[in-house]
Amino acid sequence: MKTRTKSNFYSKPFACAMAALLLAVITALTSCQNGAKPAANEMDPKKTEETATLLAGDVTGEISITCYDTSIYKPFLEEAIALFEAKYPGTKINIETFAPLPTITTMENEDGTTSEIMSSSNDDVPDYITRVTTDIMSGKGADIYAMDRLPYQKYAQSGSLEDMRYYMEADPEFDIANYRANIFEGVRFNGGQFMLPMDFHFSLMLFDREKAGEEAAAKLRSKNEFTYWEMTDIVKERFAADESGAKIMDILFMDDLTNIMIDDLFLLNSASYVNREDNTVNFTDGAFVDFLTKYKQQADNNYFKSKLTEGEGNNIAGYENPNNQIGYFFKSMLSYAIKDIFLDDAMTAIGKPGLYSYNVKPNDEKLGIMVNDKGQGGYEFYVGFAMNSNSVNKRLAWEFMKFMLGEEMQKSLNLLGIPVSKTAYEHYAKQFITESPNYVAGESVGEYTVDGTIVLDEDIEARQAALTQYKQYMEEIIPKLQFAIMRDNTITGMVRAETGAFLSGEKTAEEAAQELQNKVGMYLNE
């Protein structure tokens, strides 16, 4: 068992400072060592030739993968390793983890049943970043890194990560046409492909047609992409006249929506304020002040819900009586549940409404995706990997990354998001619409029959129709996803703090913007 004690001197702020210092040093050292080199978006012919020679070698040896916390993707990794090592006897792939195991607390409910609550802490993330950065500076480190906690842009900028474009182009077995190219391009940095997402996910917006009213509903149906401000402007008059206590937005979190919306809207438009490629910030040209001003106007007009209070009921449809819930003009649905809309419509058409979704209410209608002020849609990924440029077995590292992008692993049930493989996506869509069991309302055990799930043959035509409509719709939406939302908790924490000071009246919008200009600028150049 690994144990660690901390003296009074070794604190979390000190760990953060050390991590930042190490990142600054590695960036400076790499720049000095490399000297002049082609722009990242220009491929080096010599590197192309070297990569082709490398890929002609045997797939053998041992590599390691370093992750902070594999709780989300550990089953996927373990499955991939077992299959890969069986395919290539003599190879060995090790997983190194850093985060402590989550804490599981058992609670006894009033009805005599028990519930388990799993919780984890990110307190060790600065320690993890420091360790990885130190390893890279020493010319060592793991061969592959999971990019769920590490400062991807800083590592890419320093030359610490391999540009995967060379491997993708040199390997005759890899064809970009088989993948969602926009999902790969959305994580490019300075033109280079320093990371490969294995999957992706995003949020679809819904609107309540009854609350919106016919005039607004017609405008909301006119396209399938809206900025936040476009959405809310369309219904603002109906919202102002609503006497039911409804709010403007529900994003399915039981928390203070004011803070959550600040995070989400900032992340959606963060490229307008923070340029990670040249480490510049732009909070003071008036755009951020305008954002804060408009947001405060909405907050003052009671657009957002506060934390749930006793008696409100759960805000996720299906777990509590929907009649006890707050009403919302808009809400978001995670991409894995989009199929529910199409299934619900199809089943309603054959007289079986409301049995196929916990998220969709009778008046809910799909809207589209929320885009940033430049009209670009964002997405996130559960699993994304980068190759250490110091790896001593790049041949094996690439082959394993390519294996995880192969059809077998892309079809795995352990891949939580939408697969980036187009072929695997076909399988993914069928799996959840035409090949999954139906949930049938029963009298004996709440929402289910005594026997649990039952497959009903008579609804297969409706399911097939839902599958066709779902796929057509997704092919309209997915190409609109043009950039990956890369979370930096330090920056979002600064934004939340300064925004809070503005909303509470402690600072003006201009003062908050100037403070962010100073703080974020200093952070990026540490």
Image: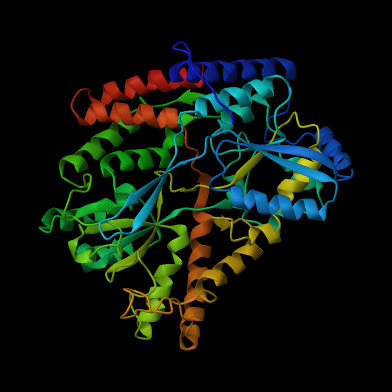
Q: Position of residue 463 (x, y in %)?
A: 48, 79
Q: Quadrant of the N terminus?
A: top right
Residue shown at 78% from the left, 33% from the top: 44
Up the image or down, 271 lies above or below 56; here it is: above
Residue 192 visible: no
Q: Position of residue 95 (x, y in %)?
A: 67, 40
Q: Is residue 44 left or right of residue 506?
A: right
Q: How many marks?
A: 0
Residue shown at 27% from the left, 21% from the top: 511
Q: Is residue 221 left or right of residue 193?
A: left
Q: Position of residue 256 (x, y in %)?
A: 26, 42
Residue lying farthest to the bottom in this orientation? 458
Residue lying farthest to the top in this orientation? 9
- Between residues 70 and 33, which one lies in front from this camera angle? 70
Asked which quadrant contains residue 501, the reply is top left
Residue 359 visible: yes
- Between residues 96 and 383, which one lies in front from this camera angle? 96
- Between residues 86 and 474, which one lies in front from this camera angle? 86
Up the image or down, 399 lies above or below 220; here it is: above
Up the image or down, 444 lies above or below 274; here it is: below
Rendered image coloring scheme = rainbow
Up the image or down, 180 lies above or below 518; here it is: below
Residue shown at 67% from the left, 15% from the top: 29
Q: Position of residue 132 (x, y in %)?
A: 62, 26
Residue shown at 45% from the left, 17% from the top: 11
